[in-house]
Amino acid sequence: MRTEELFYPELQVVIGPYVLQEGITFTSYSDPKTPYDWCRILFTEEFQGSIQVEEKAEVEVYAGYGGSLQLFFKGLVAKNYNQAGAKDEILVKDYSLKLAETKVTNTFLDVSPQELVQYSLQEAGIIEYELTDQVYRPKGVVSVIQKTVVEFLKEINALWNIQADSYFQLGKFYWGMEPEQQEIYVFEYGSNIISLTRENSFWVLLTVSVPFIGHSQLIEGEHPYVSGEFLVSRVSCFVNEDGWLRTKIWFQA
């Protein structure tokens, strides 16, 4: 378990040919139940009108402390951005963009769901992925005609009557499993918890910047309202009105 004093974060955004450490703010949102994770990068006057980025340009967002930066969002520019644009922001989506745009057509014989997922990812140009090793009975014949990878993934679940969640984290695709977690981070009342409230059926923990926390990870909370280990449902990181980097974590007790 690990508790840290995380109060003075550093930020870096690599977007196309640009490496930005000042003059930017952002908001990111990560939820396995949504079509894609996203990050909205906003420019201050320092950079407005001077940046041009093409659609599908690679984006990496880093945050950290004491000169040690850690990647916490990776994706693609959703549409072209140039100085003629009226907005001062760039919308970045995770690699689900590729899955939504790639269509597959093929017939497979004596095939497992993992083989179909792997084929679809390769068609979309996704090379980093981990799939569950659970054994499923092969299907004799599976045909697909001009369906997007997103649609085909849903069909694969239906064909085998399974509920295999799939999502990207840091550019890597996961199907039917979660990323390996090395440590469980501790959030303590009176230390690194700014507030703890209820929202519908979720607890919502507001804390200082913790860019290394993602959905589907375990955290430990120590608070008068609720204590124990909890599975993170979704996460949002953002720069608040005072310029501080904050993280909001949703979980259920």
Image: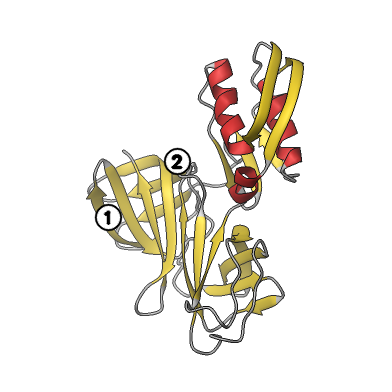
Tell whether 34 sits left or right of 105. left
Label pair 1/2, CB-CB below 8 angstroms? no
Q: How many marks?
A: 2
Residue for point 63% across, 43% down:
99
Q: Nearer the viewer, residue 93 or 22?
A: 93
Disc 1: which residue = 196
**Tag 1: residue type?**
Leu
Disc 2: which residue = 33
Tell whether 60 sits left or right of 210. right
Splitting the image into 4 quarters, where does residue 66 fall? bottom right
Q: Is residue 118 visible?
A: no
Question: Residue 25: horizontal and vertical position, in percent?
Answer: 48, 75
Dot 1 lies on which element?
strand
Callout 2 crowding tier (Cα within 10 Å): few <14, some 14–19, many ≥20: few
Q: Is residue 40 visible?
A: yes
Residue 129 is labelled as: none
Residue for point 58% across, 16% down:
160
